[in-house]
Image: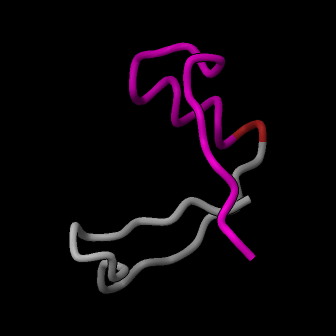
Amino acid sequence: MYPSTCKSDGFPKPGFRPVSLTDEVMDRIAQAMGCAVESMMFEPYPT
């Protein structure tokens, strides 16, 4: 799964680089946000 970073107009921000969301990355994001990883929710990107 990859996070999508878009502006309010729906277009990706310049310089966007996709990052694979592994368990380790999710733990680091949760730590940086100061919340439990279980409280974060991501929806899959439509294919």
Number of residue marks: 0
- Colour style of the rendered protein structure: secondary structure
The residue lying at 68 percent from left, 69 percent from top is 46
Residue occupying image coordinates x 30% and y 78%: 13
Q: Position of residue 12 (x, y in %)?
A: 37, 80
Tell me where residue 41 sits by quadrant.
top right
Residue 5, image quadrant: bottom left
Residue 33: name its quadrant: top left
Q: In the rendered structure, which segment of residues is drawn in magenta?
A: 25-47
- Where is residue 15 drawn, in percent x and y? 36, 84
Q: In this picture, is 7 found above or below 44? A: below
Q: Is residue 40 left or right of residue 35?
A: right
Q: Quadrant of the N terminus?
A: bottom right
Q: Quadrant of the C terminus?
A: bottom right
Residue extending furthest left? 8
Residue 27 at x, y percent in the picture: 64, 29
**Position of 40 relative to 38 (above/below):** below
Please tell me whether residue 2 belongs to the stretch shown in magenta. Answer: no
Image position of 5 with respect to 43: above or below: below
* Residue located at (69% from left, 56% from top): 44
Query: Residue 31 location, x and y as percent?
Result: 50, 23
Residue 21 lies, with reference to residue 33, above or below; the image says below
Pick the residue in front: 46 or 18. Answer: 46
34 part of magenta stretch: yes
